[in-house]
Amino acid sequence: MGNRLSKIVTKTGDHGETGLMGTTRVPKDHPRIEAIGSADELNAQIGLLMAHLPKSLREIHQELLIIQHHLFNVGGELVMPEYAMITSEMVTWLETRIVHYNEALPHLKEFILPSGSLPTCHAHVCRTVARRLERMMVTLHQAEPLNPEIFQYINRLSDYFFVLARTLACHTQDHEVLWNKALIE
C-alpha cells in the first residue's frame, strides 16, 4: 500500500472548505462534515476510554478496538456515500454484545446519573457523542439519503455504551449513582 497521508499541510482548507473523495468540495460546516467530525470525536473518546480500562477488562478493550475500526468505516461511508461500509452483520454483532452485558445487570428502577468511576463516566461520554452523531446523521439524511445500516449501527452503539457504562460501574465502583428525585424537592 502506498503512502496515504504523505502531505499533511495542503492549505486547501484555508477558505472554509474541505474535500470529500474525488473532487467534491463542501463547506467545513456542511452536515456531512459535522457528522464525520463527530464520528472522529467518538473514535477518539473510545481510545481514551480504552486507556482508562482496568487491565482485567481485556475483553471489553478488544470490543472497543473492533468498534473503533467500525467507526472508521462510518467515517469512510460518510466521505464516500456511494459505498456502503456498515453492514447488518456489524449491527447484529453490537446487538449481541448489548444483550450479553444487559443480561448480567440488575433491572433499573430509577434513572442513573453519568457519574462514578473514570471508565464509567467515559463510557457515558461516548454514549452522548454517539447520540449527537446520530442526530447529525438524521439531519444529513434529510438532504442526502444514507445507508439504513449506518443509522442502525450508531443507534445501537449509543445503547452499547449505556449498558457498558453500567457494566463498568459494576466492575469499578460499589454501585451505580441513581437519580434521587427527593434531592430536588
Image: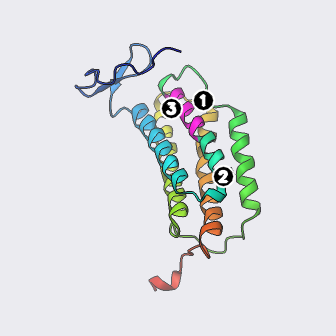
- Nearer to me, 143 or 78: 78
Residue at the spot 50% in from the left edge and 29% down from the top edge: 78
Mark 3 near mark 1, Cβ–Cβ under 8 Å? no
- Tell me the quarter of the picture where residue 91 sits: top right
Q: Which of marks 1 and 2 is nearer the N terminus?
A: 2
> Above or below — where is 80 with respect to 36?
above
Q: Earlier in the sequence, mark 3 or mark 1?
A: 3
Could you tell me how far apart the alpha carbons at marks 3 and 1 are, in whole angstroms? 13 Å
Crowding near pointer 1: few (<14 within 10 Å), some, many (20+)? Answer: some
Image coords of residue 144 (percent x, y): 49, 27
Of the numbered discs in the image, which one, if any, rests on residue 147? 1
Residue 116 visible here = yes
Label 3 SS: helix
Q: Give the range drawn in magenta.
A: 68-78
Mark 2, residue position = 58
Q: Earlier in the sequence, mark 2 or mark 3?
A: 2
Is 163 part of what is drawn in magenta? no
Crowding near pointer 2: few (<14 within 10 Å), some, many (20+)? Answer: few
Could you tell me how far apart the alpha carbons at marks 2 and 3 are, in whole angstroms? 26 Å
Residue at the spot 29% in from the left edge and 25% down from the top edge: 17
Residue 156 visible here = no
> Above or below — where is 43 with respect to 116?
above
Of the numbered discs in the image, which one, if any, rests on residue 75? 3
Could you tell me how far apart the alpha carbons at marks 1 and 2 are, in whole angstroms? 32 Å
Residue at the spot 57% in from the left edge and 75% down from the top edge: 178
Looking at the rendered structure, the kind of residue marked 1 is Asn
- Nearer to me, 38 or 173: 173
Is 76 part of what is drawn in magenta? yes
Front tag of 1 and 2 = 2
Q: In the image, is 63 to the left or to the right of 36?
A: right
Looking at the rendered structure, the kind of residue marked 2 is Arg
Looking at the rendered structure, the kind of residue marked 3 is Gly
